[in-house]
Image (cartoon, grey):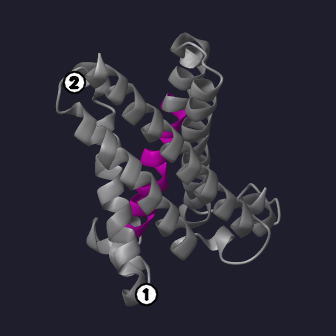
Amino acid sequence: MAWGQDNRWQLTGLSFYQVFPVFGLLAFSLMWAHYAMSALRQYLKLDTTVLRNYFEITSLMVLAAILLHPGLLAWQLWRDGLGLPPGSEINYVSPSMGIYVVIAMVSLLIFLAYELRRMYGNRPWWKYVQYASDVAIFLILIHSLKLGSQLQVGWLRPIWYFYGITLAISLAYTYLLKYQNRQKTVVK
């Protein structure tokens, strides 16, 4: 809605500079929904199969969005003669904001590593990739709040704060349950 309003609902003739933000908004919103739905499922003590189809479909949407968001920007910057990533993206923002591009790039690499969960998810070290992914979602929240044009003013910014608070609650609840389950295992 915010993206459409910013573009006055003119959906033709848009450049990639105008299009790439919507994929960032979509990716973060869907990832937030994954965390919130997972915590809710655990709270309601539902089996993981209840949301399996939802997670499979929306995970593909997230992957597409997290590739399109920086990809469209990189493509347009390159076409405009501004070079290749990472330099072109870092130079796209003011020098003081470059760090927020860098944390987004690191987060992207972490999220892409997380996509290997089907092959490596049962390995003992995989939990560290999960921890990194949990940190990365907060880094993307910061990136969004600092650089997202639709989040600088208006009604969407408070929603993003709501996302941040509920994301923290969802993760805290999930980690609390993991801790309690570990304690039960140790006691047995």
Asked whether 48 or 109 is in front, the reply is 48
Residue at disc 2, secondary structure? helix
Q: Which part of the image, by quadrant, shows the N terminus? A: bottom right
In the image: residue 99, left or right of residue 5:
left
The amino acid type, in three-letter code, at marker 1 is Ser
Residue 179, quarter of the rendered image:
top left
- Residue 65 within the segment the image draws in magenta: yes
**Residue of label 1:** 94
First to last magenta residue range: 60-78
Residue 77 visible, this angle: yes
Dot label at residue 128:
none
Return the x and y of residue 15 as percentages of the image width and height. Answer: 59, 63
Q: Is 114 above or below relative to 91?
A: above
Quick one: SS at disc 1? Answer: loop
| Three-letter code, disc 2 | Tyr
Instruction: Looking at the image, tell me whether mark 1 or mark 2 is earlier in sequence order.
Output: 1
